[in-house]
């Protein structure tokens, strides 16, 4: 496990890293914080402790493309017994607030990944992320185009980490022996799968 300070001090050349596979939420960007989750709960007019149960329980289905964003928030509101009317405008506002919660891109990570790419290392974003989130927060954004050659998005593939298939897809894209791929993630279950497939790993804290 390591911090951004430890990550940027890695000697990628000595490690024989030829490709980086980097997570989004919690690595390239801040993870959604309690204040934003509290705002979502306030909008739903339910306590945060109640709101966040379906918010997290159903998140995997959103990230895997089983729900679109509006259907996801409809299900969350139903499950937490929210009294608000879940019309399209309300659902879109909830999704907008959710997007903002994950939108704080970390400048030091952008610079580090960009510099690695500029040095000749292949780069890919490998994220559990709904297609709509990817389209609004990542696709076509200047920072993302500067940093990454490829984007491996669970919502597009219909497969979430830590399933092996998404890692196999990521390895295939970069056409690199797993021994020479450094996978960076904040989830220990994802780190374990990457290790089992022969990748080098960095558990980001």
Image (spheres, helix red, strand yellow):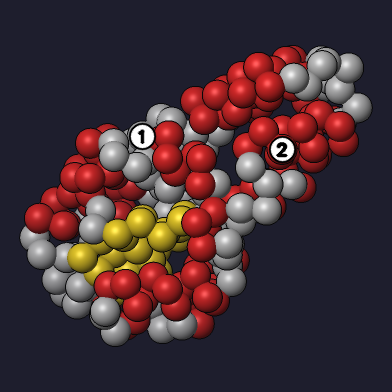
- Residue 117 as seen in the image, left or right of residue 108: left
Vertical order, 201 against 109 (above or below): below
Q: Quadrant of the N terminus?
A: bottom left
- Residue 129 as seen in the image, left or right of residue 11: right
Vertical order, 47 against 58 (above or below): above
Q: Residues within 10 Å of mark 2 (few under 14, many from 20)?
A: some
Dot 2: what SS?
helix
Vertical order, 146 against 169 (above or below): above
Residue 93 drawn at (x, y percent): 61, 19
Q: Which residue is mark 1?
A: 105
- Residue 203 as seen in the image, left or right of residue 181: right
Which of the two residues, 50 or 98, is positioned nearer the viewer here?
A: 98
Residue 95 drawn at (x, y percent): 60, 28
- Residue 158 as seen in the image, left or right of residue 28: right
Which of the two residues, 123 or 112, is positioned nearer the viewer here?
A: 123
User: Residue at image x 51%, y 47%?
Assistant: 131
Q: Which mark is residue 78?
A: none
User: Residue at image x 26%, y 80%?
Assistant: 176
Q: Residues within 10 Å of mark 1 (few under 14, many from 20)?
A: some
Residue 115 drawn at (x, y percent): 14, 51
Residue 116 drawn at (x, y percent): 16, 57
Q: Is residue 184 shown to the viewer in this render?
A: no
How far is disc 1 from disc 2 in space, using C-alphas?
26 Å
User: Residue at image x 34%, y 42%?
Assistant: 139
Q: Which residue is mark 2?
A: 71
Dot 1: what SS?
loop
User: Residue at image x 57%, y 65%?
Assistant: 159
Q: Earlier in the sequence, mark 1 or mark 2?
A: 2
Q: Nearer the viewer, mark 1 or mark 2?
A: 2
Vertical order, 152 against 5 (above or below): below
């Amino acid at each position: 496990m390591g911090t951004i300070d430890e990550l940027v001090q890695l000697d990628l050349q000595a490690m024989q890293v030829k490709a980086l596979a980097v997570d989004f939420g919690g690595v390239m960007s801040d993870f959604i914080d309690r204040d934003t989750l509290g705002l979502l709960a306030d909008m739903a007019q339910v306590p945060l402790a109640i709101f966040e149960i379906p918010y997290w329980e159903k998140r995997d289905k959103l990230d895997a493309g089983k729900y679109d964003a509006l259907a996801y928030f409809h299900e969350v509101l139903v499950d937490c017994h929210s009294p608000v009317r879940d019309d399209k405008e309300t659902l879109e506002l909830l999704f907008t607030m959710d997007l903002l919660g994950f939108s704080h891109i970390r400048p030091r990570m952008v610079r580090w990944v960009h510099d690695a790419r500029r040095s000749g290392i292949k780069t890919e974003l490998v994220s559990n992320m709904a297609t709509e989130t990817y389209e609004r927060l990542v696709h076509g954004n200047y920072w993302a185009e500067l940093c990454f050659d490829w984007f491996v998005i669970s919502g597009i593939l219909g497969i979430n980490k830590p399933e092996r298939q998404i890692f196999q897809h990521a390895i295939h894209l970069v056409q690199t022996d797993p021994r020479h791929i450094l996978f960076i993630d904040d989830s220990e279950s994802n780190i374990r799968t990457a290790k089992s497939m022969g990748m080098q790993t960095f558990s980001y804290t």
